[in-house]
Image: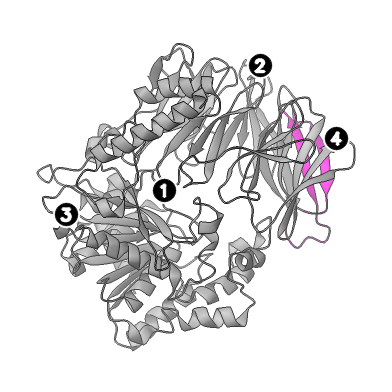
Amino acid sequence: MNALAFLRAFRRLMNALASLRAFRGVLLSIFLLPAAAGAQEATHRDPSSPAPLARSEFLRPTLLHAVRLSPDGQRVAFLRGELGKRGLWLQSLHETAAQRVLPQVDASDLIWSRDGQWIFLVASAQLSVYRLDGQGGTGRIARLNGQVSHEVIGADPSQPAAILLLEHTRPGAAKPRARLLRIAAAGQQQVLYEDALPLGDAVLSADGKLAFLRRIEREQHLILRLRLGQAPMEVARCVNLERCQFVSVADDGSLWMLSNHAQNFSGLQRLKPDGQLELLHSDPQALADIDAVSSDPLTGEPLLAAYRSVVPQVYGLNVATQLTLERLQAQLPGRDLSVQMGHGAWLISERDSCLPQARWHAFDPKSGELRRLALMEETAPLQDCQNWVRKAAMHWKGSDGLRLHGFLSLPQASDPRSLPLVVSVHGGPWSASGPGFSPITQFLVSRGYAVFEPNFRGSTGLGRAYLFAANGDFGNGLVLGDIVAGTRAVLAQGVGDAQRVAIQGASFGGYAALQAATFHPDVYQVAIAGVPPSDFGWALRWAITQSDLRDQIGTPLAIRFKLLGVDPHDSTVMQRLHTQSPLANATQLQRPVVIFAGGRDERVAIRSVTHYAARLRQLGKAVDLYVESDAGHGLEDSLSREAFLFILEQSLHTQLGGPAPLPASADLLAYLQRSQR
C-alpha cells in the first residue's frame, strides 16, 4: 500500500469512528452515513432558549459574491452588496480590512487576468475591466447584448490580460453560429474558432496553440482537438447526457475534465493526446459524483477533488497535497472546504449546514497558518452553529432494493417520536438536496419540526445509474414510492409522530407533495405546494414550446427529457403521467392542500395551477390558493418569500398542531389578503 492509499484508508477509519460517536443511539437501522473527519456532534436549539428567530432572519440576502483569489495569492477581489448596489472590493491577505475600489458596478461575476493586473467584471449586458495600478483603462470594453448570447469561460491562460467566451446566435436564427472569442483588457476581440453548431465548452493550452472544444450535435457532444488555424479533429464523444466538463490542458497536450464517460460516477479524467481516457480520481466511497477540483495556478493541474452530494469530502490528488490538506482540515474539522490556490497562499471557503454564510480564510500551505478574513460585516447569530442544526446524511431502501439517500434535521426534543415531521422535496426533478445550509429546513427546525429531505431516484450528483433509475416513472410509481418509503423509514426509527406528517416543496417538489397527499393520505396529513405542475406530462409539453427553457443552448429540451425517460412526444407516456396526475385524481384527494403560485411563472403555466385549484374547489376539497401576480417561478421579492414562510408555518400550525406563526406585519397582512384567491 503506497503512502496516499494508507492516508485514505486511515481517514475512512477515522470517519467511521467519528460517525459512531456523533450519532450514537439515533436512527441506527437507517444507517446514518459517516460525517466528515472530526465532525462535531449535531447541534440543536435548546427548547429553553429565547423565542424563535424572526422570519426575516431566514430571508437575509447574500451580499458577498464572486470572491476570487489573485493568481499570485496576494489579494482577494469580491463584489459586495445587493444587485444594483454592488461595489468592487479588494483585500490584501496581509491586511485586516478591505477597500472598496469601485462604488457601484453592474456585475454578477469577476475574473482575474493571468498577470493579476486586471479584473474583468461580467454583467448580463456588458464586459468591463478594472486596472489595479490606477492607470487608464478602467471601464466598459464590450457589450454583450443583442442578437447573440454569451458565456464567459474564464481567463485566457495563454495571454497576460484576456478572457475567453463563447458566443451563440439565438435559437431559430437564419444562420446559426457559435464562436470562441478572446477579448483583451484593452478591448480588442479575436475570433479563435467558429462553428455552425453550438459549443458547450472550450479550453486553451498555456502556449495558446492547442484548443479543445465541445461541439453539440443534438444528443451527442463531440470533443474536438485542434491546433489554432487548422481543422479540428474529433477525439472523443459524450453521449446519453454524459458529463464532459473541461478543466485545463496539460503540458503534454492532455485534457483534464470532469466526466462520467463510460462509468457510473463522475470523476477526474484525462483525455490523452492519443485519444485514450484515463480515470485519475473518483469518490473513494462510491457514493457521489465529483463536484469540483482545485488546480495549480501555474500549470492548471488539478490538485484537490471535492465531492458534496452526501457528506462533503475533499481529497488531495498527490501525497504532498493530501498532507497539506490534512493540516488545513485539522484546523477546520468537519467543515465543507472549498480551496482556491494562489502561488503562495490558498483562499478557503468554510461552509456547513449550520452556517448561513461562508467563512473565508487565508491559508499558508508551507507554514500551515490559517487566518480568518472578515470580508464583510457579520451578524453573530447567523455565524454561530449553536443557533442552528446540522443535517445528518442518511439512506434507506426503495421498493426494488435501490439504496437511496437524503438528509434528516432534528430540533432538540426529549422524545423524537413526538416531533411533527415535515418532508421537504426538492425541485427539478433532476436536481438534489445538498448537505449545505438550507433556510427553509432551518426555519422549520427552529419551529420544532423534524425535517426529512429525500433525494429520490432521478436526483443528480449520485451517479448515472441513480439518475436514470427513475426511468420516467414520475407518476404514482417508483419516484413517489422512494419518498414514501423514506418517510416510513424515518418514522419506523422513532423519529416523528406518524399522525403529524406534512409534505412540502416547490416546482417538482410541489407536484410530489400533491401526489403524496392524493395517493398516500395514510402517511401525509397536509401538502404545501409552491408553483406546482398539476399534470407533469402536460407541464413538460408546455415547457418545450412555451417556457424559458426552450431557448437554452445545448441538447434540445425535448431530447433531454426523452433521454431521461420522459418523451414529451410519446402519447403513451404522456397519457400515463396524466392518468396518474393530481389533476386526474382530484376526486381521490382526502387531505387539505395549500398552493402558492406566481402569475408570471415562466416554467409552470399559471393556468394549470388555477385550473387544478378550481377543480378541487368544485369537488368541495380543502384547498387554499395564493397567487402573487408579479412573481415568476422563483420568489425573488423578500415580502413574497416571507409570505411563503408564513403560509407554510400557518398551515403546519393548523394541520399538525405546531406553533402559531409570529405576528405578521401590516405589509405582510396586506400581501396575504391581496394574494389569496
Gap in Å between the C-alphas at discs 2 and 4?
36 Å
- Mark 4 burial class by Cα count in 10 Å: few <14, some 14-19, many 20+: some
Gap in Å between the C-alphas at discs 4 and 1?
40 Å
Mark 3 highlights which residue?
416
Dot in front, 2 or 4: 4
Q: Is residue 339 visible in this depiction of the protein?
A: yes
User: Residue 444 shows which numbered tag?
Assistant: none
Mark 4 highlights which residue?
227
Q: Mark 2 vs mark 3: which is more N-terminal?
A: 2
- Mark 1 burial class by Cα count in 10 Å: few <14, some 14-19, many 20+: many
Dot in front, 3 or 4: 3
Gap in Å between the C-alphas at discs 2 and 3?
63 Å
- Residue at 17% x, 61% y: name it: 658
User: Residue 135 shows which numbered tag?
Assistant: 2
Mark 1 highlights which residue?
434
In this picture, which residue range is highlighted in magenta? 171-197
Give x and y (percent) for residue 328: 41, 22
Give x and y (percent) for residue 470: 50, 66
